[in-house]
Amino acid sequence: MIELRNLTKKFGDFTAVDHLDLTIRTGEFFGLLGPNGAGKTTTISMMSTVLLPTGGEILIDGHRLDRKASAEKRKLSVITQEYSMRQDMNMEEVMEYQGRLYRIPRKQIREKTEELLEFAGLAEYRRRTVRHLSGGMKRKLMICRALLIEPEILLLDEPTAGMDALSRRQMWNLLRRLNERDITIILTTHYMEEAQALCDQVALINRGKLQKLDTPQALIEELGAFAVDETSEDSLKSRYFSTRQEAIAYLQTADHSAMLRQTTLEDVFVECAGRKLDSGR
Amino acid sequence: MGILTVLWEKWVEFRRDFYKITVAAMISPLMYLIIFGMGIQTTSHGEPYLHFLIPGVVAMSTMTGSFSAIAQNMSVQRLYEKALDQVMVSPTPLWQFILGQVIGGSLRGMYAGGIILLLTMPIRTDLTFNALSLFIMFLNGLVFSTIALTLSFLAKSYTDAPRFTSYIITPMSFLCNTFFSTEQMPAGFRQAVSVLPLSQSAGMIRAIANGEDPGWIGFAILAAYLLVFGLLSMNFIYKKKNL
Protein backbone atom coordinates (compact mmCIF):
# COMPACT_ATOMS: atom_id res chain seq x y z
CA MET A 1 0.00 0.00 0.00
CA ILE A 2 1.18 3.50 -0.83
CA GLU A 3 0.14 6.44 1.30
CA LEU A 4 0.69 10.08 0.48
CA ARG A 5 0.17 12.04 3.67
CA ASN A 6 -0.18 15.78 3.53
CA LEU A 7 2.32 15.79 0.67
CA THR A 8 3.43 19.29 -0.27
CA LYS A 9 5.99 20.60 -2.71
CA LYS A 10 6.88 24.25 -3.14
CA PHE A 11 9.24 25.83 -5.64
CA GLY A 12 9.91 29.23 -4.12
CA ASP A 13 6.51 30.90 -3.72
CA PHE A 14 4.82 28.48 -6.11
CA THR A 15 3.03 25.50 -4.57
CA ALA A 16 3.10 22.63 -7.07
CA VAL A 17 1.56 20.02 -4.76
CA ASP A 18 -0.62 21.22 -1.92
CA HIS A 19 -1.29 18.93 1.08
CA LEU A 20 -2.14 15.91 -1.04
CA ASP A 21 -3.57 12.87 0.76
CA LEU A 22 -3.96 9.64 -1.20
CA THR A 23 -4.04 5.95 -0.41
CA ILE A 24 -3.30 3.48 -3.17
CA ARG A 25 -3.99 -0.15 -2.38
CA THR A 26 -1.70 -3.00 -3.42
CA GLY A 27 -2.57 -4.24 -6.89
CA GLU A 28 -4.62 -1.16 -7.74
CA PHE A 29 -4.43 0.59 -11.11
CA PHE A 30 -4.47 4.22 -10.07
CA GLY A 31 -4.75 7.25 -12.34
CA LEU A 32 -3.47 10.69 -11.45
CA LEU A 33 -5.17 13.17 -13.75
CA GLY A 34 -5.09 16.89 -14.11
CA PRO A 35 -4.41 19.71 -16.55
CA ASN A 36 -0.89 20.84 -17.44
CA GLY A 37 0.86 22.17 -14.36
CA ALA A 38 -1.55 20.41 -11.98
CA GLY A 39 1.32 18.75 -10.08
CA LYS A 40 1.14 15.22 -11.51
CA THR A 41 4.77 14.95 -12.59
CA THR A 42 5.93 16.65 -9.38
CA THR A 43 4.01 14.02 -7.38
CA ILE A 44 5.57 11.17 -9.40
CA SER A 45 9.01 12.78 -8.99
CA MET A 46 8.54 12.83 -5.22
CA MET A 47 7.44 9.19 -5.30
CA SER A 48 10.65 8.36 -7.14
CA THR A 49 12.68 10.50 -4.66
CA VAL A 50 14.14 12.68 -7.41
CA LEU A 51 12.36 15.56 -5.68
CA LEU A 52 12.07 15.74 -1.91
CA PRO A 53 8.80 17.01 -0.43
CA THR A 54 8.64 20.39 1.27
CA GLY A 55 6.16 18.85 3.70
CA GLY A 56 4.34 15.61 4.37
CA GLU A 57 5.53 12.11 3.61
CA ILE A 58 5.17 9.06 1.40
CA LEU A 59 4.79 5.64 2.98
CA ILE A 60 5.23 2.33 1.20
CA ASP A 61 3.79 -0.58 3.17
CA GLY A 62 4.02 1.61 6.25
CA HIS A 63 7.67 2.59 5.77
CA ARG A 64 8.69 6.13 4.96
CA LEU A 65 10.13 6.56 1.48
CA ASP A 66 13.24 8.70 1.22
CA ARG A 67 16.56 8.54 -0.63
CA LYS A 68 18.05 6.19 1.94
CA ALA A 69 15.13 3.73 1.86
CA SER A 70 16.74 1.04 -0.33
CA ALA A 71 14.22 -1.67 0.62
CA GLU A 72 11.27 0.52 -0.39
CA LYS A 73 13.00 1.76 -3.55
CA ARG A 74 13.64 -1.86 -4.55
CA LYS A 75 9.87 -2.23 -5.04
CA LEU A 76 9.63 0.79 -7.36
CA SER A 77 10.17 1.27 -11.03
CA VAL A 78 9.54 4.51 -12.87
CA ILE A 79 8.84 5.43 -16.47
CA THR A 80 9.35 9.15 -16.62
CA GLN A 81 7.78 11.55 -19.06
CA GLU A 82 11.20 12.51 -20.43
CA TYR A 83 13.59 9.95 -21.88
CA SER A 84 15.75 9.55 -18.79
CA MET A 85 18.56 7.42 -20.19
CA ARG A 86 22.23 7.67 -21.05
CA GLN A 87 22.13 8.79 -24.67
CA ASP A 88 25.49 7.24 -25.51
CA MET A 89 24.65 3.73 -24.27
CA ASN A 90 23.17 1.10 -26.51
CA MET A 91 20.02 -0.81 -25.56
CA GLU A 92 21.86 -3.76 -24.03
CA GLU A 93 24.02 -1.43 -21.96
CA VAL A 94 20.96 0.53 -20.75
CA MET A 95 19.38 -2.73 -19.61
CA GLU A 96 22.57 -4.02 -18.00
CA TYR A 97 23.09 -0.75 -16.13
CA GLN A 98 19.55 -0.98 -14.77
CA GLY A 99 20.04 -4.62 -13.76
CA ARG A 100 23.30 -3.85 -12.00
CA LEU A 101 21.74 -0.91 -10.13
CA TYR A 102 19.14 -3.36 -8.79
CA ARG A 103 21.73 -6.08 -8.09
CA ILE A 104 20.21 -8.58 -10.48
CA PRO A 105 22.56 -11.46 -11.39
CA ARG A 106 24.24 -11.03 -14.80
CA LYS A 107 22.75 -14.21 -16.26
CA GLN A 108 19.26 -13.11 -15.29
CA ILE A 109 19.87 -9.64 -16.77
CA ARG A 110 20.89 -11.19 -20.11
CA GLU A 111 17.93 -13.58 -20.25
CA LYS A 112 15.37 -10.98 -19.22
CA THR A 113 16.84 -8.38 -21.61
CA GLU A 114 16.55 -10.84 -24.47
CA GLU A 115 12.95 -11.62 -23.55
CA LEU A 116 11.88 -7.99 -23.09
CA LEU A 117 13.58 -6.59 -26.18
CA GLU A 118 12.09 -9.43 -28.22
CA PHE A 119 8.66 -8.73 -26.74
CA ALA A 120 8.93 -5.00 -27.52
CA GLY A 121 10.15 -5.65 -31.07
CA LEU A 122 13.49 -4.00 -30.31
CA ALA A 123 15.77 -7.04 -30.42
CA GLU A 124 17.27 -6.23 -33.82
CA TYR A 125 18.26 -2.75 -32.61
CA ARG A 126 19.95 -3.93 -29.41
CA ARG A 127 23.35 -2.46 -30.37
CA ARG A 128 21.92 0.88 -31.42
CA THR A 129 22.72 3.80 -29.10
CA VAL A 130 19.81 5.61 -27.48
CA ARG A 131 20.47 8.86 -29.33
CA HIS A 132 19.87 7.03 -32.62
CA LEU A 133 16.46 5.64 -31.59
CA SER A 134 13.10 7.10 -32.56
CA GLY A 135 10.86 8.55 -29.84
CA GLY A 136 8.62 5.48 -29.84
CA MET A 137 11.60 3.12 -29.57
CA LYS A 138 13.01 5.11 -26.65
CA ARG A 139 9.63 4.90 -24.91
CA LYS A 140 9.50 1.13 -25.43
CA LEU A 141 13.06 0.78 -24.16
CA MET A 142 12.14 2.68 -21.01
CA ILE A 143 9.28 0.25 -20.46
CA CYS A 144 11.62 -2.74 -20.97
CA ARG A 145 14.05 -1.17 -18.52
CA ALA A 146 11.30 -0.63 -15.93
CA LEU A 147 10.07 -4.22 -16.27
CA LEU A 148 13.54 -5.75 -16.07
CA ILE A 149 13.52 -5.47 -12.30
CA GLU A 150 10.04 -7.03 -11.88
CA PRO A 151 8.73 -4.18 -9.72
CA GLU A 152 5.90 -4.35 -7.20
CA ILE A 153 4.97 -0.74 -7.94
CA LEU A 154 5.16 0.85 -11.37
CA LEU A 155 5.06 4.64 -11.66
CA LEU A 156 4.17 5.78 -15.17
CA ASP A 157 4.32 9.42 -16.11
CA GLU A 158 2.60 9.86 -19.48
CA PRO A 159 3.80 6.45 -20.69
CA THR A 160 2.07 6.55 -24.07
CA ALA A 161 2.98 10.13 -24.98
CA GLY A 162 4.29 10.19 -28.54
CA MET A 163 3.11 6.66 -29.33
CA ASP A 164 0.97 5.85 -32.34
CA ALA A 165 -2.55 4.46 -31.78
CA LEU A 166 -1.50 0.83 -32.32
CA SER A 167 1.48 1.03 -29.97
CA ARG A 168 -0.73 2.72 -27.39
CA ARG A 169 -3.26 -0.14 -27.52
CA GLN A 170 -0.41 -2.67 -27.20
CA MET A 171 0.81 -0.74 -24.19
CA TRP A 172 -2.64 -0.80 -22.59
CA ASN A 173 -2.78 -4.57 -22.99
CA LEU A 174 0.67 -4.91 -21.47
CA LEU A 175 -0.26 -2.72 -18.51
CA ARG A 176 -3.46 -4.69 -17.93
CA ARG A 177 -1.46 -7.94 -17.91
CA LEU A 178 1.03 -6.48 -15.44
CA ASN A 179 -1.77 -5.27 -13.20
CA GLU A 180 -3.32 -8.76 -13.29
CA ARG A 181 -0.03 -9.99 -11.79
CA ASP A 182 -0.80 -7.77 -8.77
CA ILE A 183 1.61 -5.01 -9.70
CA THR A 184 0.40 -1.69 -8.35
CA ILE A 185 0.34 0.82 -11.19
CA ILE A 186 0.19 4.57 -10.79
CA LEU A 187 -0.36 6.38 -14.04
CA THR A 188 -0.48 10.00 -15.08
CA THR A 189 -1.89 10.66 -18.49
CA HIS A 190 -3.39 13.32 -20.70
CA TYR A 191 -5.44 10.70 -22.50
CA MET A 192 -8.71 10.43 -20.61
CA GLU A 193 -9.84 7.38 -22.56
CA GLU A 194 -6.63 5.72 -21.36
CA ALA A 195 -7.46 6.40 -17.71
CA GLN A 196 -11.07 5.35 -18.22
CA ALA A 197 -10.04 2.11 -19.90
CA LEU A 198 -7.35 1.16 -17.42
CA CYS A 199 -7.79 2.67 -13.98
CA ASP A 200 -9.63 1.21 -11.00
CA GLN A 201 -9.53 4.57 -9.31
CA VAL A 202 -8.59 8.07 -10.40
CA ALA A 203 -7.61 11.21 -8.58
CA LEU A 204 -8.26 14.53 -10.28
CA ILE A 205 -5.86 17.19 -9.15
CA ASN A 206 -5.67 20.83 -10.07
CA ARG A 207 -3.12 23.39 -8.90
CA GLY A 208 -1.65 20.71 -6.68
CA LYS A 209 -4.87 20.07 -4.78
CA LEU A 210 -7.02 16.96 -4.83
CA GLN A 211 -10.34 17.78 -6.50
CA LYS A 212 -11.97 14.37 -6.83
CA LEU A 213 -11.13 10.78 -5.98
CA ASP A 214 -13.24 7.83 -7.04
CA THR A 215 -13.66 5.13 -9.68
CA PRO A 216 -14.04 6.45 -13.25
CA GLN A 217 -17.61 5.14 -13.38
CA ALA A 218 -18.59 6.79 -10.09
CA LEU A 219 -17.13 10.12 -11.24
CA ILE A 220 -19.04 9.88 -14.51
CA GLU A 221 -22.29 9.04 -12.72
CA GLU A 222 -21.76 11.90 -10.31
CA LEU A 223 -21.59 14.31 -13.24
CA GLY A 224 -24.41 12.55 -15.11
CA ALA A 225 -24.05 9.44 -17.22
CA PHE A 226 -25.53 11.10 -20.32
CA ALA A 227 -24.33 14.22 -22.06
CA VAL A 228 -25.97 16.52 -24.59
CA ASP A 229 -23.57 18.56 -26.68
CA GLU A 230 -25.06 21.76 -28.03
CA THR A 231 -23.21 23.39 -30.88
CA SER A 232 -23.78 27.08 -31.48
CA GLU A 233 -21.86 29.32 -33.91
CA ASP A 234 -18.84 29.86 -31.72
CA SER A 235 -18.90 27.26 -29.00
CA LEU A 236 -19.68 23.76 -27.87
CA LYS A 237 -21.55 23.42 -24.61
CA SER A 238 -22.28 20.19 -22.80
CA ARG A 239 -25.06 19.44 -20.33
CA TYR A 240 -25.17 16.32 -18.20
CA PHE A 241 -28.11 14.18 -17.10
CA SER A 242 -28.50 11.21 -14.81
CA THR A 243 -30.86 9.30 -17.08
CA ARG A 244 -31.28 8.87 -20.82
CA GLN A 245 -34.92 10.04 -20.54
CA GLU A 246 -33.90 13.35 -18.99
CA ALA A 247 -31.25 13.86 -21.69
CA ILE A 248 -33.73 13.08 -24.50
CA ALA A 249 -36.29 15.43 -22.99
CA TYR A 250 -33.73 18.23 -23.00
CA LEU A 251 -32.59 17.37 -26.52
CA GLN A 252 -36.12 17.92 -27.82
CA THR A 253 -36.17 21.43 -26.43
CA ALA A 254 -32.68 22.44 -27.57
CA ASP A 255 -32.45 25.55 -29.77
CA HIS A 256 -29.14 24.69 -31.38
CA SER A 257 -27.83 21.59 -33.08
CA ALA A 258 -27.46 19.04 -30.30
CA MET A 259 -26.25 15.46 -29.87
CA LEU A 260 -26.80 12.86 -27.17
CA ARG A 261 -23.91 10.68 -26.00
CA GLN A 262 -22.56 8.91 -22.97
CA THR A 263 -20.52 10.98 -20.55
CA THR A 264 -16.82 10.19 -20.46
CA LEU A 265 -14.03 10.77 -17.99
CA GLU A 266 -12.88 13.58 -20.24
CA ASP A 267 -16.13 15.42 -19.44
CA VAL A 268 -15.41 15.00 -15.74
CA PHE A 269 -11.89 16.23 -16.32
CA VAL A 270 -13.02 19.28 -18.29
CA GLU A 271 -15.71 20.20 -15.78
CA CYS A 272 -13.30 19.73 -12.91
CA ALA A 273 -10.48 21.66 -14.51
CA GLY A 274 -12.89 24.41 -15.44
CA ARG A 275 -11.75 24.39 -19.01
CA LYS A 276 -13.97 25.12 -21.98
CA LEU A 277 -14.06 22.58 -24.71
CA ASP A 278 -12.59 23.72 -27.93
CA SER A 279 -15.44 24.04 -30.42
CA GLY A 280 -13.21 22.60 -33.12
CA ARG A 281 -12.68 19.36 -31.22
CA MET B 1 28.48 -3.49 -5.26
CA GLY B 2 27.08 -0.10 -6.28
CA ILE B 3 30.66 1.14 -6.62
CA LEU B 4 31.38 -1.62 -9.14
CA THR B 5 28.22 -0.71 -11.09
CA VAL B 6 29.41 2.88 -11.44
CA LEU B 7 32.91 1.72 -12.38
CA TRP B 8 31.35 -0.58 -15.00
CA GLU B 9 29.42 2.41 -16.39
CA LYS B 10 32.66 4.44 -16.48
CA TRP B 11 34.41 1.54 -18.20
CA VAL B 12 31.68 1.38 -20.89
CA GLU B 13 32.15 5.09 -21.47
CA PHE B 14 35.95 4.79 -21.54
CA ARG B 15 35.91 1.83 -23.93
CA ARG B 16 33.56 3.60 -26.33
CA ASP B 17 35.40 6.95 -26.30
CA PHE B 18 38.91 5.53 -25.89
CA TYR B 19 40.50 7.46 -28.77
CA LYS B 20 38.75 10.74 -27.98
CA ILE B 21 39.67 10.51 -24.29
CA THR B 22 43.28 9.56 -25.04
CA VAL B 23 43.86 12.28 -27.62
CA ALA B 24 42.16 14.92 -25.45
CA ALA B 25 44.36 13.91 -22.49
CA MET B 26 47.52 14.23 -24.58
CA ILE B 27 47.17 17.41 -26.61
CA SER B 28 47.43 20.27 -24.08
CA PRO B 29 50.10 18.72 -21.82
CA LEU B 30 52.15 17.70 -24.82
CA MET B 31 51.99 21.26 -26.18
CA TYR B 32 53.17 22.64 -22.83
CA LEU B 33 56.05 20.17 -22.73
CA ILE B 34 57.11 20.93 -26.30
CA ILE B 35 56.74 24.71 -26.12
CA PHE B 36 57.99 25.44 -22.60
CA GLY B 37 60.24 22.48 -22.06
CA MET B 38 61.85 21.86 -25.41
CA GLY B 39 61.04 24.90 -27.61
CA ILE B 40 61.98 27.60 -25.11
CA GLN B 41 65.16 26.12 -23.60
CA THR B 42 65.51 27.55 -20.09
CA THR B 43 66.75 26.43 -16.73
CA SER B 44 65.19 26.48 -13.28
CA HIS B 45 67.34 26.36 -10.14
CA GLY B 46 70.26 25.37 -12.36
CA GLU B 47 68.39 22.39 -13.80
CA PRO B 48 66.79 22.08 -17.25
CA TYR B 49 63.28 23.58 -17.03
CA LEU B 50 61.82 20.30 -18.32
CA HIS B 51 62.79 18.71 -14.99
CA PHE B 52 60.62 21.24 -13.21
CA LEU B 53 57.85 21.09 -15.78
CA ILE B 54 57.21 17.34 -16.11
CA PRO B 55 55.99 16.70 -12.51
CA GLY B 56 53.78 19.81 -12.74
CA VAL B 57 52.25 18.70 -16.03
CA VAL B 58 51.65 15.19 -14.66
CA ALA B 59 49.78 16.66 -11.67
CA MET B 60 47.88 19.06 -13.94
CA SER B 61 46.85 16.25 -16.33
CA THR B 62 45.58 14.20 -13.39
CA MET B 63 43.51 17.19 -12.28
CA THR B 64 42.00 18.00 -15.68
CA GLY B 65 41.41 14.31 -16.49
CA SER B 66 39.48 13.71 -13.26
CA PHE B 67 37.60 16.98 -13.27
CA SER B 68 36.43 16.82 -16.88
CA ALA B 69 35.45 13.13 -16.58
CA ILE B 70 33.00 13.97 -13.80
CA ALA B 71 31.91 17.60 -14.23
CA GLN B 72 30.75 17.33 -17.83
CA ASN B 73 29.33 13.84 -17.49
CA MET B 74 27.35 14.43 -14.29
CA SER B 75 25.98 17.79 -15.42
CA VAL B 76 24.70 16.22 -18.64
CA GLN B 77 23.32 13.17 -16.81
CA ARG B 78 21.53 15.30 -14.23
CA LEU B 79 20.25 18.19 -16.28
CA TYR B 80 20.03 17.07 -19.91
CA GLU B 81 19.71 13.30 -20.13
CA LYS B 82 17.96 13.03 -16.74
CA ALA B 83 19.79 9.71 -16.44
CA LEU B 84 20.56 10.44 -12.78
CA ASP B 85 16.85 9.81 -12.09
CA GLN B 86 17.49 6.13 -12.88
CA VAL B 87 20.08 6.02 -10.12
CA MET B 88 18.03 8.05 -7.64
CA VAL B 89 15.05 5.69 -7.81
CA SER B 90 17.18 2.53 -7.69
CA PRO B 91 18.02 0.77 -4.42
CA THR B 92 21.75 1.36 -4.96
CA PRO B 93 22.89 3.30 -1.87
CA LEU B 94 23.72 6.81 -3.04
CA TRP B 95 26.97 6.94 -1.05
CA GLN B 96 28.17 4.02 -3.16
CA PHE B 97 27.21 5.92 -6.30
CA ILE B 98 29.23 8.94 -5.13
CA LEU B 99 32.20 6.78 -4.19
CA GLY B 100 32.08 5.00 -7.56
CA GLN B 101 32.00 8.32 -9.39
CA VAL B 102 34.94 9.66 -7.39
CA ILE B 103 37.07 6.53 -7.86
CA GLY B 104 36.13 6.34 -11.55
CA GLY B 105 37.02 10.01 -12.03
CA SER B 106 40.32 9.55 -10.25
CA LEU B 107 41.21 6.56 -12.42
CA ARG B 108 40.53 8.67 -15.50
CA GLY B 109 42.84 11.32 -14.06
CA MET B 110 45.54 8.71 -13.44
CA TYR B 111 45.15 7.54 -17.02
CA ALA B 112 45.72 11.11 -18.27
CA GLY B 113 48.74 11.54 -15.97
CA GLY B 114 50.05 8.10 -16.89
CA ILE B 115 50.04 9.04 -20.59
CA ILE B 116 52.32 11.99 -19.83
CA LEU B 117 54.64 9.74 -17.84
CA LEU B 118 54.81 7.34 -20.78
CA LEU B 119 55.37 10.11 -23.31
CA THR B 120 58.20 11.65 -21.30
CA MET B 121 59.84 8.32 -20.54
CA PRO B 122 62.23 8.50 -23.53
CA ILE B 123 63.52 11.89 -22.33
CA ARG B 124 66.55 11.39 -20.06
CA THR B 125 65.68 13.40 -16.95
CA ASP B 126 66.68 11.15 -14.04
CA LEU B 127 63.36 12.07 -12.42
CA THR B 128 61.88 9.46 -10.09
CA PHE B 129 58.25 8.36 -10.25
CA ASN B 130 57.33 5.62 -7.81
CA ALA B 131 54.29 4.09 -6.11
CA LEU B 132 54.00 7.12 -3.84
CA SER B 133 53.86 9.37 -6.92
CA LEU B 134 51.03 7.21 -8.26
CA PHE B 135 49.25 7.43 -4.90
CA ILE B 136 49.51 11.23 -4.95
CA MET B 137 48.12 11.24 -8.49
CA PHE B 138 45.23 9.06 -7.31
CA LEU B 139 44.60 11.29 -4.29
CA ASN B 140 44.73 14.39 -6.49
CA GLY B 141 42.20 12.71 -8.82
CA LEU B 142 39.90 11.92 -5.89
CA VAL B 143 40.00 15.55 -4.74
CA PHE B 144 39.17 16.99 -8.15
CA SER B 145 36.48 14.38 -8.78
CA THR B 146 34.70 15.40 -5.56
CA ILE B 147 35.05 19.08 -6.50
CA ALA B 148 33.59 18.27 -9.94
CA LEU B 149 30.72 16.33 -8.36
CA THR B 150 29.89 19.15 -5.96
CA LEU B 151 29.88 21.70 -8.77
CA SER B 152 27.80 19.47 -11.04
CA PHE B 153 25.13 19.30 -8.30
CA LEU B 154 25.19 23.10 -8.13
CA ALA B 155 24.99 23.52 -11.91
CA LYS B 156 21.76 25.04 -13.19
CA SER B 157 22.46 24.16 -16.82
CA TYR B 158 24.64 21.50 -18.40
CA THR B 159 26.52 24.28 -20.16
CA ASP B 160 27.83 25.35 -16.73
CA ALA B 161 30.48 22.58 -16.83
CA PRO B 162 32.76 24.40 -19.31
CA ARG B 163 32.37 27.55 -17.19
CA PHE B 164 33.57 25.71 -14.10
CA THR B 165 36.63 24.68 -16.10
CA SER B 166 37.28 28.29 -17.08
CA TYR B 167 36.80 29.62 -13.54
CA ILE B 168 38.63 26.91 -11.60
CA ILE B 169 40.71 24.53 -13.65
CA THR B 170 42.35 26.97 -16.08
CA PRO B 171 43.64 29.39 -13.38
CA MET B 172 44.87 26.50 -11.24
CA SER B 173 46.61 24.93 -14.24
CA PHE B 174 48.79 27.99 -14.70
CA LEU B 175 49.22 29.24 -11.14
CA CYS B 176 49.53 26.19 -8.93
CA ASN B 177 53.16 25.15 -8.96
CA THR B 178 52.97 23.70 -12.48
CA PHE B 179 54.88 26.10 -14.74
CA PHE B 180 56.69 28.11 -12.07
CA SER B 181 57.27 27.83 -8.35
CA THR B 182 54.76 29.51 -6.03
CA GLU B 183 57.78 30.80 -4.09
CA GLN B 184 58.14 33.54 -6.71
CA MET B 185 54.69 34.94 -6.00
CA PRO B 186 54.02 38.00 -3.80
CA ALA B 187 53.37 37.29 -0.12
CA GLY B 188 49.72 36.72 0.66
CA PHE B 189 48.92 35.58 -2.86
CA ARG B 190 51.64 32.96 -2.51
CA GLN B 191 50.10 31.51 0.66
CA ALA B 192 46.63 31.50 -0.90
CA VAL B 193 47.82 29.66 -4.02
CA SER B 194 49.98 27.28 -1.97
CA VAL B 195 47.02 25.80 -0.12
CA LEU B 196 45.22 24.95 -3.35
CA PRO B 197 45.22 21.19 -4.02
CA LEU B 198 47.11 21.27 -7.32
CA SER B 199 49.97 23.26 -5.73
CA GLN B 200 50.34 20.54 -3.14
CA SER B 201 50.09 17.63 -5.60
CA ALA B 202 52.56 19.18 -8.03
CA GLY B 203 54.92 20.02 -5.17
CA MET B 204 54.82 16.50 -3.73
CA ILE B 205 55.23 14.74 -7.10
CA ARG B 206 58.14 17.09 -7.88
CA ALA B 207 59.77 16.42 -4.50
CA ILE B 208 59.63 12.65 -5.11
CA ALA B 209 60.88 13.14 -8.69
CA ASN B 210 63.94 14.95 -7.29
CA GLY B 211 64.57 12.31 -4.64
CA GLU B 212 63.27 14.48 -1.79
CA ASP B 213 60.80 13.79 0.99
CA PRO B 214 57.31 15.08 0.02
CA GLY B 215 56.46 15.64 3.70
CA TRP B 216 53.00 15.14 5.18
CA ILE B 217 51.44 18.59 4.97
CA GLY B 218 50.46 18.08 1.32
CA PHE B 219 48.71 14.82 2.15
CA ALA B 220 46.84 16.50 5.01
CA ILE B 221 45.73 19.38 2.79
CA LEU B 222 44.53 17.00 0.04
CA ALA B 223 42.75 14.84 2.62
CA ALA B 224 41.01 17.96 3.99
CA TYR B 225 39.77 18.93 0.50
CA LEU B 226 38.62 15.35 -0.10
CA LEU B 227 36.71 15.31 3.18
CA VAL B 228 35.03 18.69 2.67
CA PHE B 229 33.97 18.15 -0.96
CA GLY B 230 33.13 14.49 -0.34
CA LEU B 231 30.75 15.51 2.46
CA LEU B 232 29.29 18.29 0.32
CA SER B 233 28.60 15.80 -2.52
CA MET B 234 26.96 13.39 -0.07
CA ASN B 235 24.88 16.19 1.39
CA PHE B 236 23.69 17.26 -2.05
CA ILE B 237 22.70 13.81 -3.24
CA TYR B 238 20.87 12.93 -0.03
CA LYS B 239 19.42 16.31 0.94
CA LYS B 240 19.10 18.52 -2.16
CA LYS B 241 15.36 19.05 -2.58
CA ASN B 242 15.34 19.39 -6.36
CA LEU B 243 18.01 17.28 -8.00
Image: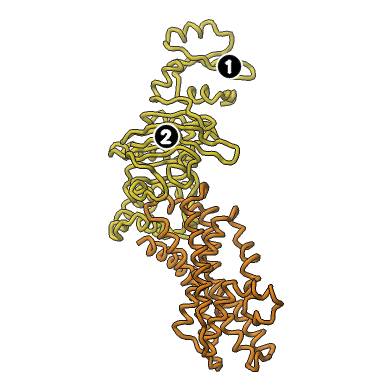
Chain colours: A yellow, B orange
**How many numbered tags mark residues here?**
2
Identify residue for label 2. A5
Specify whether residue B187 is in view. yes
Front residue of A152 and A247:
A152
Horizontal placement of A43 versus A112: left or right? right
Residue in the picture at 56% in, 26% down: A281
Instruction: Tell me if mark 2 has few (under 14), some (14-19) or many (20+) residues whose alpha carbon lies within 10 angstroms of its own.
Output: some
Q: Position of residue A140 (x, y in %)?
A: 42, 47
The N terminus of chain A, quarter of image: top left
Horizontal placement of A45 versus B34: left or right? left
Instruction: Tell me if mark 1 has few (under 14), some (14-19) or many (20+) residues whose alpha carbon lies within 10 angstroms of its own.
Output: some
Query: In terms of secondary structure, where does tag 1 sit?
Result: strand
Q: Position of residue B65 (x, y in %)?
A: 54, 71
Identify residue for label 1. A231
Looking at the picture, which amino acid does disc 1 mark? Thr
Of labels 1 and 2, the one closer to you: 2
Pointers 1 and 2 in contact (CB under 8 A)?
no
Specify whether residue B19 is in view. no
